[in-house]
Amino acid sequence: MKKTVVTFGLIGGAIMAAMMFATLPFVDKIGFDKGEIVGYTTMILAFMLVFFGIRSYRENVSGGRISFGRAFAVGILITLVACVCYVVAWEILYFKFMPDFVDKYASYAVEKVRASGASQQIIDAKLQEMKSFKAMYDNPFINAAITFVEPFPVGLIVTLISAAILRKKPLAASSDESQPAQLQVQ
C-alpha cells in the first residue's frame, strides 16, 4: 500500500503545487475570484489520482477485490500526501516569493465590501478581520494548518466517492459448497 499511496499522492501533490506556482503569481491579473475557481478546479483534477490510486491498489495489490474501508484508507492516505505537498508548496511560495499576498487579498476583500455599498462600520470590521488574518498567516504553523484545510475536504469527498465506486467484495463460496450435503432418499 505504501508504494501506491506515495506514488499517487506525490503526483497529485505535484500537480497542485505546479499549478499554484504557475498561477498564483498572476492572481493580480487573473483576479482573486477567478484564481479561486482555477485553484479548486486544479484540486479536483489532482485528486482524481485518488481514484486511480485506489483502482491501482485494487488491481495490482489486492487481487481485484477491495472493501470500502480499505479503499477509503488508501484514498485518504493519498489525499494526505497530496495535501502535505500542497502545504509545502504554499509555505515556500508565501514566505519566500509572495509575502505581500495577504495584503493584496485584504485590499481586494475590503474593496469588495466597499463596492457592495456597506456601511463604514462593516468596512471597518472587514479591515480588522483582515489584520487578524494577516497576523495568523504570518505564523508558519497556523498558515500551514489553514492551508491544509483548503484541499483536504475536496480530497475527502473524492475519496468517499472513489471508495464507493471501486469497492468489490470477495467472491463468496458458491451456495452448493456452503450448504451441508444432504442425503437423497428415494
Image: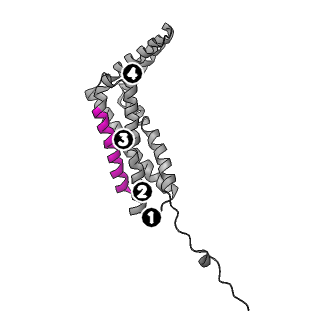
Magenta segment's dominant SS is helix
**Residue 104, located in which quarter of the rendered image?**
top left
Q: At 50% across and 57% down in the image, what residue appears?
A: 167
Which tag, 4 or 2, sits closer to the chain's start? 2
25 or 81, which is in the foreground?
25
Residue 131 vs 150, above or below: the answer is above
Magenta residues span 1-22
Mark nearer the viewer, 3 or 1: 1
Residue type at tag 1: Gly
The Cα atoms of the two marked residues, 2 and 3, are separated by 22 Å
Residue 157 vs 112, above or below: the answer is below
Residue 135 vs 87, above or below: the answer is above
Per the image, label 3 sits on a secondary structure element best described as helix
Classify residue 137 as left or right of residue 113.
left
Q: Would you say the residues marked 2 and 3 are in contact, meaning their CB atoms lie under 8 Å apart?
A: no
At label 4, counting other C-alpha atoms closer than 10 Å, the crowd grade (few under 14, some 14-19, many 20 or more) is: few
- Give coordinates of residue 172: x percent, y percent: 56, 70
The Cα atoms of the two marked residues, 1 and 4, are separated by 50 Å
The Cα atoms of the two marked residues, 3 and 1, are separated by 29 Å
- Give coordinates of residue 45: x percent, y percent: 38, 42
Q: Is residue 142 visible?
A: no
At label 3, counting other C-alpha atoms closer than 10 Å, the crowd grade (few under 14, some 14-19, many 20 or more) is: some
38 or 61, which is in the foreground?
38
Is residue 13 inside the magenta stretch? yes
Image quadrant for the N terminus? bottom left
Residue carrying label 1? 64
Residue type at tag 4: Ala
Which tag, 3 or 1, sits closer to the chain's start? 1
